[in-house]
Amino acid sequence: MEEIGSKHIDKLVRMACEGNGPAFTALWDTHIEQLRAYIHHTMKTLGDFDVDDICSRSFEKAFRQIGTYDPSKGQFFTWLKTIARNTGLDFIDSEARAHPKDQFIYLDDETDTGGVEKIASPGKNPLDSIISDEEHEKNVSYVSKLPELYREVARMRVIDGMKYNEIAENLSLDLNTVKTRIRRAKVMMDRMRSEDEG
């Protein structure tokens, strides 16, 4: 849908960036069904009500953060999917804490052999949450210290949890280039982690 009317989408995004509410409503109308389908596909355990809730929250976040969207780095819908993925993972995490039980969140396609295909997300106690937050902060710090060539792909993968093919599309890079850069970035981050611990 976005490829067909990309000029129309770009115009709506520009208007929304200027604070035009009706333009953002038009972006909602254009992308809501795609976003619902994406969340249903990637977070199969969620029901329709939860999917709709995540869609609403995602568009609210997108509206508040529209000024940070950079069309030179990728399509609006790719940016919106990143917001929706993070919103969905936050939702699943809060549900897991409220109703402790093991759940699995699929972060990658089965063909995406470069990384972990799924991670267990059991309910967390407060200590686990603190440790998780500290890990996240360390990762953000390590990514920021990477050479520029690797920094953006590492941020998208390690911090934002994007798939390799999404990163490739977002940055207009070859998939193998993305995988190579992420692999090298992880080696450098592991070295930083070792130096911190040693």
Image (tube, grey):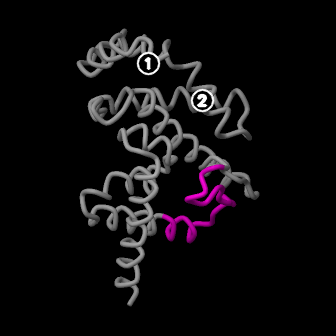
Which span of residues is magenta-colored?
Answer: 111-132
Spatial CA distance of label 2 from label 1 is 27 Å
Nearer-N-terminus badge (2/1): 1
Q: Nearer the viewer, residue 107 or 185?
A: 185
Residue 120 on image: x %, y %: 68, 60
| Left or right: 43 in relation to 172 | right
Which residue is at a point 42% across and 52% down the rendered structure image? 178
Look at label 1 and name its amino acid.
Glu
| Left or right: 187 in relation to 97 | left
Look at label 2 and name its amino acid.
Asp
Which residue is at a point 46% across and 64% down the rendered structure image? 133
Q: Nearer the viewer, residue 43 or 128?
A: 43
Q: Nearer the viewer, residue 3 or 55?
A: 3
| Left or right: 134 in relation to 65 | right
Residue 3 disc label: 1
Check if residue 130 falls in the magenta segment. yes
Q: Nearer the viewer, mark 2 or mark 1?
A: 1
Please determine whether, in this image, residue 143 is positioned above or below residue 46: below
Q: Which quarter of the picture shows residue 35?
A: top right
Check if residue 77 falls in the magenta segment. no
Asked if the residue at tag 1 contacts the one at tag 2, i.e. Cβ–Cβ closer than 8 Å, the answer is no
Residue 53 disc label: 2
Please determine whether, in this image, residue 45 is positioned above or below residue 48: below
